[in-house]
Image (tube, rainbow, N blue to C red):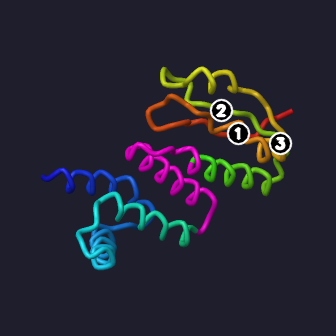
Amino acid sequence: MTEDEAAITDWLSRVTDFGVSRRDFDRHREELSKQFGASASVNDTMWRMLNVLIGRAGDAATLRSVYLEMAALAAREGKDPKPYLAEGLKLELEEHRRQGVTTVRVRNCNDNFVCPACQALYDKTWRIEAALSEMPIPTLCEAPSGCRCGYSPAMR
């Protein structure tokens, strides 16, 4: 298996729940290659497909997952994953608000990869409006794929 094939296989295994198939990948890669006038890279094809998925996502949870995939891809390319993580977290906050939640608590993965900035925010509570305006997470986290924190409803 080539390096490209391994990358494609790995990525497709993570996005099969979105209904993405190898045939979809090949079709998008072919279209991009025609547009570029050269063979499109695996990452360029993934970016295109993730952008298509943003337009097709039917619910906030799926859309948040797509943004998480974008963040992971950005991190692998040495780019800042924070804008994609922030979009996903905004969706999470909006969904909590839609469900009637007014206050949220910052949660993290509670493992050895949680950075000091995330650890300091753990279990802190925020009114949803304040969390949306201040966006305490994502932080400039030192975790390999960026900040992995999220929000959960805070019971008062």
What residue is shown at x 66% (from left), y 37% (from top)? 137
Of pointers 1 and 2, the one earlier in the residue sequence: 2
- What distance separates the C-alpha of mark 3 from that of mark 1? 15 Å
Q: Quadrant of the C terminus?
A: top right
Q: Check disc 3 and report its element: helix, strand or loop.
A: helix
Residue 111 is labelled as none
Circle nearer the viewer, 3 or 1: 3
Tell me the CA gap for discs 2 and 3.
Answer: 16 Å
Circles 1 and 2: CB atoms closer than 8 Å: yes
Q: Residue at x 70, y 39 (%)?
A: 152
> Vertical placement of 117 versus 81: above or below?
above
Task: Name the residue carrying label 1.
Answer: 152
Label 2 Cα crowd, 10 Å radius (few <14 / some 14-19 / many 20+)? many
Start and end of the magenta stretch?
58-84
Q: Residues within 10 Å of mark 3 (few under 14, many from 20)?
A: few
Query: Disc 2 residue type?
Result: Arg
Contact flag, marks 2 and 3 (Cβ < 8 Å): no
Secondary-structure class at tag 1: strand
Residue 3 in picture, x, y percent from top left: 18, 50
Q: Position of residue 37 (x, y in %)?
A: 26, 76
Inspect the magenta stretch and tell me whether residue 81 lies in it.
yes
**Residues marked 3 and 1 touching at CB (< 8 Å):** no
Q: Amino acid at mark 1?
A: Ser
> Which residue matches tag 2?
107
Which structural element holds mark 2? strand
Q: Nearer the viewer, residue 12 or 33?
A: 33
User: Which residue in the protein does label 3 denote?
Assistant: 130
Q: Where is residue 89? Give x, y as percent.
A: 65, 48
